[in-house]
Amino acid sequence: MAAGSGPAPPAEAQPPPPIHHLPPDALHNVLLRLQLRDAVVCRPVSRLFHETLSPQLLALLPSLRLLLLRHPRPDGGGCLHAFDPARRTWLRLPFAHFLPYHSFSPVASSTSLLYLWVETSSSTSPLALQSTTTSSSAASPAHPLKSLAVCNPFAGTYRLLPQLGSAWARHGTVLAGPAGTVLVLTELAALSYTPSGSAKWMKHPLSLPSKPRSPILASDAVFALCDVGTPWRSQWKLFSCPLAMLTGGWAPVERAAWGDVFEVLKRPRLLAGAGGRRVLMIGGLRSSFAMDAPCSTVLILRLDLATMEWEEAGRMPPNMYRCFTGLCEAASQGGAIPATAAGGNNKVKVFGGDGKVWFAGKRVRGKLAMWEEDEMESSGKWDWVDGLPGYGDVESLF
């Protein structure tokens, strides 16, 4: 301001943008036409958008199907990375601004909801209900007390479920079902939690011949593989149980027409197919029925729950599979092919759900292989996903 000059005249108030004059119903109608990813981007733009795009309104938008990577460090760096298949882009999802726990690990997901193990103490739990398994194991420095939290990372909300014993967090497999139902399965028992029920964990004994492998939810039932073979040779069998009959409802799923469908795959794993009407079984395709036979590729089989018939849904292309065995790396470096790579017995991590299967391996750096169910093509679509964040090895998908 120049010496001797008077005070500057007050600035005229800027009129509010025209969108502020819209009736609330009209504004809601406009915002409900957004994709969820776009609504989340708009939320911090103004106070009007932040208040209007509430968690309740965001819950009305179609959910996103994302590949979420588990961070290798327990603290997670306050965020997680996710891949959006629809836009072929990687996203960074922050958690530190709403989740008051430094150590968390995602374990399951359902529509717009993510389930995480968080390190906490019993005094921090907002729920005073006593768990049916609290006394099963005590916390220790080596095994800190963990709670299961459910959160909506887009709305920035979370809540803790009733306390569980630490053994369930170390050994249990978490499944997220409809209407907020949660299951935790171990070798001997299962726990179930329903928000609309008693609001506490219910325990169900498992009448299975062995530990359930890669359990999934499909068509209001739990499906799992069990090894009924001998210590020196695996023999897999499919079991299922309706969600409404977790106690005493387990039974084998078998048909005479299936033949040796479980014998052709090595290290099989189950995943849910698109729409929850199919079960996918993925594993290494044995080159023969010999016990130590190498795998020639990765095979995806699909069980239609309406017809109870298996079919081949996909087979990893040879050029893609060679990258997981190390043949591509050896060829690019001009070296000899390692014996382990030539044998084709390298482990491939398999994860996914809802008709998408992802593959990761130590020999494949910076990218993932992806298979997606396609209604137009019975064999599905195969592709590479580049730009994998620098986590090292991929841990899981949710």
Image (cartoon, rainbow, N blue to C red):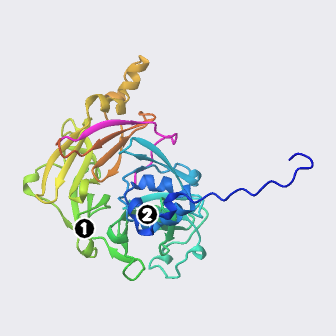
Residue 162's disc is none
Residue at the image position 59 percent from the left and 66 percent from the top: 140
Rendered location of residue 368, percent (x, y):
39, 38
Residue at the image position 28 percent from the left and 73 percent from the top: 246
Kindly state the secondary structure of the residue where label 1 is placed: loop
- Residue in the foreground of this view, choosing between 374 and 396: 374
Looking at numbered disc 2 in the image, what kind of residue is underneath it?
Leu
Rendered location of residue 369, percent (x, y):
35, 38
Report the number of discs: 2
Q: Nearer the viewer, mark 1 or mark 2?
A: 2
Kindly state the secondary structure of the residue where label 2 is placed: helix
Residue at label 2? 27
Image quarter (top left, top right, bottom left or bottom right) of the C terminus: bottom left
Residue at the image position 53 percent from the left and 63 percent from the top: 48
Residue 227 seen: no
* Image: magenta residue range: 379-398
Looking at numbered disc 1 in the image, what kind of residue is underneath it?
Asp
Q: Is residue 317 above or below residue 354?
A: above
Write down the quadrant of residue 196 in the picture: bottom left
Cα distance in 3D space between marks 1 and 2? 37 Å
Write down the quadrant of residue 394 in the picture: top left
Residue at label 1? 220
- Residue in the foreground of this view, choosing between 189 and 183: 183
Overall secondary structure of the magenta stretch? loop
Write down the quadrant of residue 16 in the picture: bottom right
Rendered location of residue 335, percent (x, y):
41, 18
Q: Is residue 77 above or below residue 118?
A: above
**Left or right: 157, with 354 as reference point:** right
Q: Is residue 396 above or below residue 219?
A: above
Residue 388 seen: yes
